[in-house]
Amino acid sequence: MTIVNHNEKIDTVNVVIDGIEMEVPKGTLVIRAAEQIGIEIPRFCDHPLLTPVAACRACLIEIDGVPKPQPACAQVLSEGMNVRTQRSSEMARIAQEGVMEFLLVNHPLDCPVCDKGGECPLQNQAMTVGRPDSRFEGEKRTFPKPINVNAEILLDRERCVSCARCTRFAEEIAGDASLELLERGAQQQVGTANDEPFDSYFSGNVVQICPVGALTSASYRFRSRPFDLVSVPTTCEHCASGCSLRTDYRRGTVTRRLAWDDPEVNEDWSCDKGRFAFAYLANGRIESPLIRENGELRSASWPEAMHFAAAGLAAAGTSAVLVGGRATVEDAYAYSKFARIVLGTDNLDFRARASSTEEAEFLAAHVAGRKLDVTYTDIETASQVLLIGFEPEDESPILFLRLRKGVKRGVSVHTVGPLYSLGSEKLSAHWVKAKAGSEAHAISGLDSEIVGALDSNSIIFVGERAAASPGALSAVSRLGSQTGARIAWVPRRAGERGALDAGAIAGLLPGGRPISDPTARSEVAQAWNIDADSLPNVGLTGTELVTAIKQGSTSALVIAGVDPSDLPNGDELIAGIENADFVVALENHHSEITQRASVVFPVAVVTEKSGSFMNWEGRSKPFSAAFREALTLTDAGVLSMLASAMNVQLNGDTRALRKELNSLVPWSGPRTDVNNHEVHAPAGTTLATWRLLIDSGVMQEGEPHLAATARPSVVAVSAAMFEQLGKPEVITVTGPKGSITLPTQVAEVSNESVWLPMNSPESHIYAQLGCGYGQAVTVKGGAA
Amino acid sequence: MKLTPVITEHWDDPELYTLDGYKSHGGYEALAKALTSDPDSIIATVKDSGLRGRGGAGFPTGLKWSFVPQNDGKPHYLVVNADESEPGACKDIPIMMANPHALLEGVIISSFAIRANHAFIYIRGEVPAAIRKVAFAVKQAREAGLIGKNIQGSGFDLEVTVHAGAGAYICGEETALLDSLEGYRGQPRLKPPFPAVAGLYASPTVINNVETIANIPYIIDRGVDWFRQFGTEKSPGFKVFAVSGHVQRPGIYEAPLGITMRELLDFAGGMRPGAELKFWLPGGSSVPMLTADHLDLPLTYEAMVEAGSMLGTGTPMIFDQTVSVVKAVTRWLEFYKHESCGKCTPCREGTYWITGVLEKFEHGNGTTGEMETLTTLCGQIAGRSFCALGDAAATPYPAAIKYFSDEFTAATHTSADEQFDPVASYVFSGVRA
Amino acid sequence: MPELPAAVRGFGVTFGTIFKKVVTEQYPEDSSKYPPKPRFHGRHQLNRWADGLEKCIGCELCAWACPADAIFVQGADNSDEERYSPGERYGRVYQINYTRCIFCGLCIEACPTRALTMTNEFELADNNRADLIYEKQDLLGPMLPGMLAPPHDMVPGTTDSDYYANKITGSVPQQSTPQQSTPQQGGVA
């Protein structure tokens, strides 16, 4: 049999495994080739994405002409090699049996209390290739039972078989090399230097790849057994990386989430947020529709609430729709349609964060409707990668891992920004220092050497933060057209890229169609079965829209998934909602908005609905409901009911919406250009800030172990500024609204900026300082 | 056969360790000769001499050198394995203490041959005296212009670094030594790539034993024919034999390869009074033991393999009738258990298990079934472990059971100390009498 | 000889039987006279160690073994403050659904700590389904003399291995008041 694709010219070798002739690409390992023909060779240290170590010796096989058994996980096949595994070689069988017996010598017999029991490669392989009985009668080596390697990960050293998967993952994949094997011989154990916590955003992966129960997670500890669990594939809702995950649930409760193998996206990995932050799915949900009566919210039946909402919206004046980043593509598309058809407005935005008109132009010109222009795989072979206003480790951790993979293969990374972070260090990135808010200057002033090296094989990654740096996105746009480098926009939230393509932003119809373009209008009108003239004209977005709501010129609001504290002008939005004629909120948890809304509809979370997220690549990542019996409605479902209460027919079925959106193939007509925006960075010290991966986000609530792995809230300043401030232990940063005092961390920061986490414990930038990224702040040593 | 002191010839000169002392006996003449010749011709000379590695495995040195790719644009390194920690082996440390310049001259010539501009001497950390001697020799050589830039006007640059280990037997394994030298935890590396292609800092590296390198100046100085007049066709040359154990005069005897143990025993004054030889090991605890029946075999790489043992480090350990084989094997296994690095399963778990069972035998609590178990356990380690440490740990028991199974059978009811009075085996046992 | 009429012959059987030994067992009046066989598979019981700690470690092996899917277990972590069983893990939730149970006994064979055994009790009828789901408190064995109701510490100076080796003979006073360190009177065999 052959596993070679003959369309490509690959050097191959002919080999025989257990009598089966194969043609495999040169360099293939015995264990991989055997897998292809369904021969399972036992293994512990082997992992397809880690470099071979041949340490566990469980995979010993016989090669004709070689006197000693060889490890299949490290043995490269060569021409004419005749391999015999345990299925056809007595030598291999005995060798494997011997190793298995040795592995069990010091392994405790505590399977009944072990979380791995039932899905344990050691259990399974001991049954398939091990001896039926044990000859060991001595004392087993013992260690104190589980110790924490960090708040979320528990280590039971007795169970460890020293396969070094975890330590190799930490070093090779995550770049957090603090997990190491310590001591020697039978006392060899996994640990960290000085018992400091294993500080990594990817620590949960070591639990998943541990072939025994040595590494377990605090959140899943003693929760369930694999045979009790129902596993369903899903797409992570936490960021725009678009990871495939596996959700395991038992009796209607999610017990854990694991990374699902998706070679195109997350390979075998996931970040700790995607893995552990799921308690919010069940905790504190809104259970029934609520309507405001005499100033108080009360439960109402669905029909009552629907009629109340329909009447309220119909009676109110100009309306607007704000949809946050949690919406699936289909839900965002439903909002996009609802606004245009039912409410007749183009006042619409999905960006519940700092945004700008420049960004809207940039998205329309470069991002909307463009799919898979840049992919994860492209990163591995890119010539240069430029990161602008983007901190991959915090904002798209799986992209960060792929960048690391690329860097190992020789990709050079340049990062433009005010802070040379730990993540930049792990990417061996070159730092283009920029004052926060004046990235545009840094981009136009890039070294000719870097610019010269940019070509069509280079990638410019722009983060959503670039929107807060005036002129940055137009500078990126110019750089892209000047050099031919491809541009990829990486938002932070899972729903943003899809919402953009669904047209959930003023000025853009689905597929990146400008609402001002007559062809675009007629195409969409036809798909929506309405008259093109009835489509509204360009509405308001971003800051202007919030201001309009506050001033009352927009007096009815449909709002979903928006947390005012994410907006630089969140206070204005709250004030606007308080004054608005009518506010319909679609939410799954209570928030400052639901407390002020006229009517609140509960909507489904990701486990209760099907849908899809579009990741930063523009790749559609569909998922289906874990809990099919859930009675909660999707946002689209609620909007459909609301529309029919307002006498408009709007299909709320997820599949139908997806089909309709897919039929609106991306716009091929003219796109608007990005205007040259003025660069106006404030004088003095500016604020550099972004959200850490693990912070005070609402979707991370209810998982204290995860929260405890968060990086500490600090003020990062340059050594020069530290000196200038008189080497204070704490630093106070003051903005228009107030100040934040946090411990000092001296780091590689631009001398004209100071860095704070955006939304971490004791550091909520908008609420406490009243300003955002790139804006002027005052810095003082010591407490306020 | 006669003793042939070459490396050890002038050890009676207390000044030999100094540069002047070494030079007064013709030292560094080979270097002058080497630096004017073609590096490839040096490799060819060493190849022709048939010199085999003296560290234990006996790999032909010239062949090893020829594996180093030339003109590859990468730096080359020479690493001297001076991490002598094999139980029973005591030859490299005396060489470094008494004649460090012979090593150093060998290092310079070898580096020149393989085009290395940086050589490392990795010395076992527990012997500061040897480290000091070698460091002093390096200092003197540097001051004399024998190390550094443009050595003796040849245009050849060489830096020599003396590095102390941190106390791990595994670091005598060449790739673990490289890891340790690079600052990592000493554990053997996966081969391929072999060190000759990607060794220290992923560059081509030659790793040789102290004695091997110390042979080089004499081969270059006196020629292949001179060297080949000693020893046998397959094991040419001479060897520093370090005889230890129950002999009258334990010590260092340099003799041609092919000398018999009986002859060596005579040089060492024979067994101590009233003692008769019980078993002996040709080279360290990692080679299988032999008995009085094997005393007339030539000590060569090939003859020892034929007899079911190995020449190893060439440091015979002699045991007389007062020694309990059970106890000796147990001590060795305790050593291997303690020194197992933990990387691979058979060695890590196997030494743990075997040691536990042997300790039962030592206390007279073994069972006949466990004798069988031990044999299979050793079979489960030998050839399955990651590096030679595991193989070494699987060596003592099968050899012991081959010749002394009675003692193990007796150990199922009588402890080793009851079978053999431990005091009788002491060197000072006569004191009690 | 003429045959007697059938009716009379029938009564002959009746009268004959009147004087034979009665085989009818009166239930429930005389149920104590006829106990089930000692190895009868009846209602389950969750046993305790001699000091009152629960034997169940919440491993779910019983649930795994159950062919009728009648058992639901959820484990949890013992802590120093709140300990229900020796070792790391205890069964926080333990339910057996007797509308499903087929009394096959595979669960008690699977139990690694002999926490789960079967009693001879067979009178499990009820008039609604919900009450036939027995909770942990319904299944736990009685508190015998020398036992102390969990949560409490293990016998001072012992480990879970001592419990599994059946070395515990009863509770000691320190277990109820963990702070005190009065000298102990036995507790370990």
Image: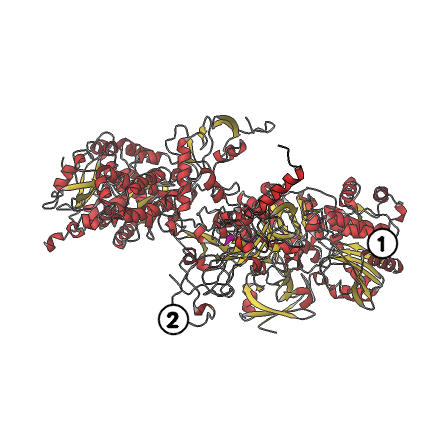
Q: Residue at x 46, y 69 (%)?
A: C178
Give residue C20's position: percent from left, percent from top. Answer: 55, 46
Q: Nearer the viewer, mark 2 or mark 1?
A: 2
| Side of A294 relative to C107 (left or right) | right
State the scheme by which the image is colored: secondary structure
* Type of amino acid at the residue the image marks with label 2: Pro
Res B231 visible:
yes
Q: Count numbered badges in the picture.
A: 2
Give residue B59's position: percent from left, percent from top. Answer: 31, 35
The residue carrying pointer 2 sits among few (fewer than 14), some (14 to 19) or many (20 or more) residues within 10 Å by Cα, namely: few
- Magenta stretch in the rendered image: C115-123
**Figure check: A61 above or below A45:** above
Quadrant hosting residue A523 = top right
| Side of C91 relative to B339 (left or right) | right
- Subunit of label 1: A
Q: Which mark is residue A171?
A: none
| Side of B115 relative to A593 (left or right) | left
* Residue at the farthest front position: C1
Q: Which mark is residue C183?
A: 2
- Subunit of label 2: C
Secondary structure of the residue carrying numbered label 1: loop
The residue that label 1 is drawn on is A345
Give residue A757's position: percent from left, percent from top. Answer: 62, 62
Cα gap from disc 2 to disc 1, whole angstroms? 81 Å
